[in-house]
Image (cartoon, rainbow, N blue to C red):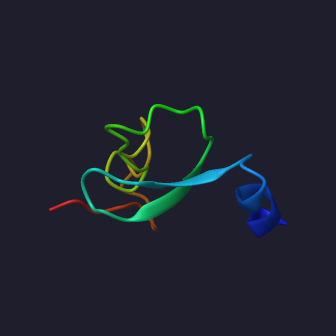
Amino acid sequence: RLVKFIDNGMLTMTKCSKCSGHFVTHPHEVARHFVCGLCNPPARAGKGKAAGGIQMH
């Protein structure tokens, strides 16, 4: 189904401006300076020191 949405122009692949990875996005999203969720995680993501928390060094 995902390929069908991309082929029909409902979704598109956008290149991250930091890591150069390609991610599925909405075609009307501003893609000029797109930064993926891996390079710019949402607020509170991985903030806890509990087991499984993201460790940034």
The number of discs equals: 0
- State the image quarter where residue 35 is shown: top left
Q: Residue at x 46, y 67 (%)?
A: 52
Q: Residue at x 61, y 40 (%)?
A: 27
Between residues 3 and 43, which one lies in front from this camera angle? Answer: 3
Q: Residue at x 37, y 42 (%)?
A: 34
Quarter of the figure that contains the C terminus: bottom left
Q: Compared with residue 13, is residue 44 higher up or lower down, i.e. above or below?
A: above
Between residues 55 and 42, which one lies in front from this camera angle? Answer: 42
Q: Residue at x 40, y 52 (%)?
A: 46
- State the image quarter where residue 15 is shown: bottom left
Find residue 12 and report its horizontal and vertical position in percent.
60, 52
Between residues 54 and 2, which one lies in front from this camera angle? Answer: 2
Between residues 18 and 53, which one lies in front from this camera angle? Answer: 18
Find residue 33 and report its horizontal and vertical position in percent.
31, 38
Quarter of the figure that contains the N terminus: bottom right
User: Which residue appears farthest toward the front when viewing the image?
Assistant: 8
Find residue 48 and report its horizontal and vertical position in percent.
40, 50
Find residue 18 and report its horizontal and vertical position in percent.
24, 54
